[in-house]
Image: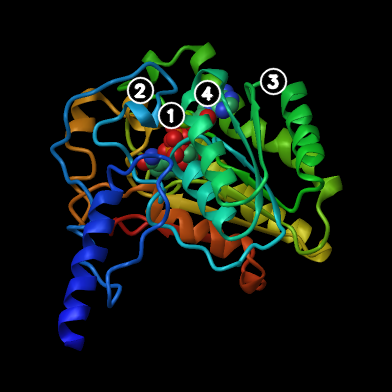
Amino acid sequence: MEETTRRQLMTIATAGVAASVAAPAGAQPQQQPLGGKQNPRDKYPKPPFPPQSQPFPGLAGQMSPRPDHGEASYVGSGRLRGRKALITGGDSGMGRAAAIAFAREGADVAINYLPVEEPDAREVVDLIRRAGRTAVPIPGDLRSAPFCRSLVDQAVRGLGGLDIVVSNAGRQKSNASILDISDEDFDWTMKTNIYAPFWIIKAALPHLQPGSVIIGTTSEQAYDPASDLYDYAQTKAATMNYVKSLAKQLGPKGIRVNGVAPGPIWTPLQVSGGATEGKVVTFGATAPLGRPGQPAELAGIYVRLAEDDGSYTTGNIYGAGGGQGQP
Ligand code: NAD
Ligand code: MG
């Protein structure tokens, strides 16, 4: 009898996880399969993917298959109760996975995104509110220093303080040759990926009390740059580097600074110019796990770096690379 019940439960729970890949954005979390173990190769869609391309910055809601940000799977346990987080690029990809997880762990969350990403952002705001937390949506372009400063002000006012800053927004544009990169293009990548974190962290610092954290999203590209990502890859090396410098500078103030280095992850960034259309079809095929990662698979890393249990972790980069060995 007990065995039957267990088997039935496993069937229901496994179906829940399978459904999570295409789950509607407002879905509530399901239980993990009993035993909590699954072959990572089979957990999510594998290449070949349908050919697709979107204008920058792309929408998660328009991708096929839809990325999994943990909408139906992430279950919190109060690890960030009462915390106040600002996440850039919080509408989609890793930022959205972090936003969902943070809210379900008990944090209030402000998200920044570009105005054209409002449809994705609305889903995230809804998910944060369904978790019973405050959501503060703040659209705007991070290439503007005045906007970055006002973003921090708006987040502090909307949340009633600030103690987690996730600098995650990024711009990636594949170019076969350095000769194809215009000065404007180069400046666009640098402004988004290097200047914006500088402006945001400077503005946030006066608000960060001891115990606060800064998390930057870097990349495997920081360590093993692709030939077609000349400009982008060097910004990710810079991110990895600022994490280590700032951790030394802010350790005496009790503020931790860490980075997350994803491998190939199924997000709008890749289908809106980050990868060539051909590479999108085979995306993740070269990873030893045989598929790209999903943003949901990194949510726990952001939580780990933000929570007090991680109090001795600073100046470190946590990876999720699918076996490609970086960092
Ligand atoms: P994503 O497209 O979901 O997120 C990137 C976000 O950056 C966008 O949603 C957008 O809101 C924001 N953004 C870009 N330009 C902006 C601007 N000028 N102003 C305001 N916001 C802007 O893709 P993602 O892959 O989740 O990207 C998140 C981070 O992960 C990026 O820093 C990216 O470099 C990094 N990363 C991604 C991968 C991958 O394979 N997807 C791998 C390694 C690192
Ligand atoms: Mg987006």
Amino acid type, callout 4: Glu
Q: Secondary structure at mark 4?
A: helix
| N-terminal label among 2 and 4 | 4
Q: Which mark is residue 273?
A: 2
Amino acid type, callout 1: Gln
Q: Outermost residue toward the front? A: 1
- Can you tell which quarter of the image residue 157 is in? top right
Q: Is residue 190 visible?
A: no
Q: Which mark is residue 172?
A: 1
At 30% across and 37% down in the image, what residue appears?
66
Report which residue position mark 4 lands on: 118
Residue 312 rendering spot, x and y as whole percentages: 65, 73
- Can you tell which quarter of the image residue 276 is in? top left
Report which residue position mark 3 lands on: 144
At 67% across and 45% down in the image, what residue appears?
134
Residues at marks 1 and 2 touching, judged by CB atoms closer than 8 Å: yes
Quote the CA–CA distance across marks 1 and 2.
7 Å
At 69% across and 20% down in the image, what residue appears?
144
Disc nearest the viewer among 3 and 4: 4
Q: Secondary structure at mark 1?
A: loop
Please give left or right for residue 254 compared with residue 85 in the image: right
75 is higher (above) or lower (below) than 268: below
Quote the CA–CA distance across marks 2 and 4.
20 Å
